[in-house]
Image (cartoon, rainbow, N blue to C red):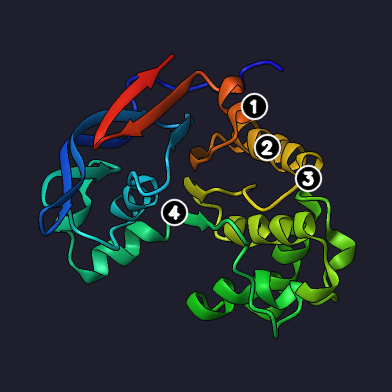
Amino acid sequence: MDNPQHTMKSDPCITVRDLTMAYDSFVVMKDLNFTINRGDIFIIMGGSGCGKTTLLRLIGGTVTPSSGYVKVDNQIVHDLGRNKLFSLRRKMSMLFQFGALFTDLSVFDNVAFQMREHTDLPESVIRDLVLMKLHAVGLRGAHNLMPAELSGGERQRVAIARALINEPDLLLADEPTGNLDKTNSDHIHSLLMELNREFSMTLVVVTHNMELATLVSRRVTIANGALQEFH
């Protein structure tokens, strides 16, 4: 498969400098430095407990580093006040390993949730947007189903549609195929790479999947608090 990346190398989306994260005396990561350009697919690998998810949380601003900083769109994330941080987060979406769908809401209502909570768009516009995103992930006909009626791969596609509903510039994915079989994993990987091609979306993906990693030119491994980058 051709590498889908098409970045403008002079246009960083995420900049990490001298980033250290510790909980009391336990150092999760130390002095990490890297840049993720707009439109990159950036793969983060490493053993359990090495700080992969913590790194995503630092990018999203849900935790504060012990030292150093993360910049997103040239803004130091942990220095932002509440309103500016929320504004920055509107440009991001998070994709979780098990989808994290609301089990008591239909597929349609899961995908529509963000629009209903954070915008004043009329329901007719929200409906068009939801069906468009479900169509993009191959599930337009599933909008009236409940999560329990879906397979694992279908639930993850709904989660992707929900993550895309606000048309983010940056998608953070934490083991998006960790609970899926190989066939469904391959489908999700292909879908993520297609989204990157079609929308120039920056993807930061935590994964243990070596097949996905080998398809992407930029991948890092975190081990013993340090980072090793492969091209």
Closest to the observer, 112 or 51: 51
Which of the two labelled residues, at mark 4 and mark 2, occupies the earlier sequence position? 4
Which of the two labelled residues, at mark 4 and mark 1, occupies the earlier sequence position? 4
Tags 2 and 1 in contact by the CB under 8 Å rule? yes
Label 2 or label 1, whichever lies nearer to me, is 1
Closest to the observer, 30 or 144: 30
What is the three-letter code of the residue carrying label 3? Asn
Q: Residue at x 45, y 35 (%)?
A: 45
Residue linked to disc 2: 189
Q: Quadrant of the C terminus?
A: top left
Residue linked to disc 4: 92
Q: How many marks?
A: 4
Residue linked to disc 3: 184
Residue linked to disc 1: 211
Q: Residue at x 73, y 62 (%)?
A: 155
Callout 4 environment at 10 Å: few (<14), some (14 to 19), or many (20+)? many
What is the three-letter code of the residue carrying label 1? Glu
